[in-house]
Amino acid sequence: MKRPAELVFIPAAGIGHVVSTIEIAKLLVSRDDHLFITLLIMKRPFDKLFTNTDSSISPRINFVNLPETKDLFVENQKTQVKDAVAKLVESNQSDSSKPRLAGFVVDMFCTTMIDVANEFGVPSYLFFTSSAACLGLLFHLQTLRDEHGKDVTEYMHSDSELVVPSFVNPLPASVLPGGLLEKESAESSLNNARRFRETKGILVNTFWELESHALHSISHCKNPPVYPVGPLLNLKSSDDDKGWDILSWLDDQQPLSVVFLCFGSMGSFGEAQVKEIACALEHIGLRFLWSLRHPPPKGKMAMPSDYADLSGVLPEGFLDRTAKIGKVIGWAPQVDILAHSSIGGFVSHCGWNSTLESMWYGVPVATWPMYAEQQTNAFQLVKELGLAVEIKMDYRKDSDVVVSAQEVERGIRQVMEHDSVTRKRVKEMSEKGKKSQMNGGSSYSSLGHFIDQI
């Protein structure tokens, strides 16, 4: 009889990474009864302690909160990871019915943990929580750096374009991920990419039909095998009371009549930008649901929060004048909202999870990226795949740029067009994404190939 196998997953800190890691863990144990998974959760000083509240999660998935360290460097978590895995191995060693340690699955920002896997003598796999196009971009820039001595930070404020194999069109330097444009973070990103090549395989949260060009280009180089296993989404309804109020308001709206504006767990704007968005919404007169968050204090590492009083940041009288057509909220149960039939378009920061969620529900996006690789995602959605319209593709959260009400209005009008080519394309891709996860679908098969070689 086959001895059970245990995989240790190490997601990066931050809810976006943890959520998609839980989804792939659920998928793996549902496909193979002999698989056990332990998730080691790192905590940043401003993160809440992770507690699993989802009763549907298999008892074969185990969560371990690692002790909090004073700093944010993954490198400094190695000892805690080693201790946690040693404990696991020790408790399983004496009993042959207990699972053997079969490998580490590390997040794209946790490649230093490959060293720990090597110490235990087990293979490492990578779980890449963004797009295959971005994975290809990292590989390409790392090759430019190592084989041609190219300094990628030269692209900062440059108007040049790069020819990147994982993209069909030349990629403007202005949409490169922010982390690649500053010396220290660029070095760290390229070092991560170097280490990706040491793994035994790369799981990517995407599907063949969405990113066939990028996946094809990666598989043609000397890279580890790539397994597209997405879209991996947590589609569980929120049980938050605030969510109920929002959804009952949406129930009263016509199909496809509401534009939803939401900018991710770290997304917030200064007052000048808030006023431009408000002017655009008031001028168009379309129904809207706007998740508006308070920026953290300048220079402080913290998450945006809900406003105690919205009237101070919005134009005077705005809430009264738009009371019949719109709702301004704080935190938003995003999945429940995107699933609602009244939502016609989504003004989004283009985080990869949000991109896949809106696609799953067939909701077209108007792009407004903020940080990380979101500018690259926006470019891919608008220019490569024709699945979004542009408000901005190169906006960066900490710049002084204020997007005008006219630009916001133009993007919202386009994304809300009922019979647009973009909407039709998104609907088609939504169907392909759902099929990819079914028995015989591309991601279903790809996950099977991954399980076979554990």
Image: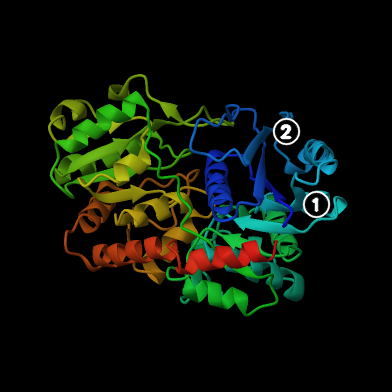
Can residue 137 be seen here? The reply is no
Amino acid type indicated by mark 2 = Asp
Residue 125 x/y as whole percent: 69, 58
Point out the tag, 1 or 2, that comes first from the N-terminus.
2
- Is 190 above or below relative to 301? below
- Give amino acid for label 1: Ala
Question: Is 444 positioned to the left or the right of 82 in the image?
Answer: left
Q: How many marks?
A: 2
386 vs 20: above or below: below
Give the image location of residue 186, x and y in percent: 67, 56
Q: Check contact, mark 1 vs mark 2: CB within 8 A.
A: no
Q: Which residue is mark 1?
A: 117
Q: Quadrant of the N terminus?
A: bottom right
- For label 2, the residue is 71
The percent coordinates of residue 409 (x first, y second) are 23, 50
Residue at 12% x, 32% y is 324
Q: Residue furthest front?
A: 1
Per the image, label 2 sits on a secondary structure element best described as: loop
Q: Is residue 315 visible?
A: yes
Q: Quadrant of the C terminus?
A: bottom right
Q: Position of residue 181 (x, y in %)?
A: 61, 56
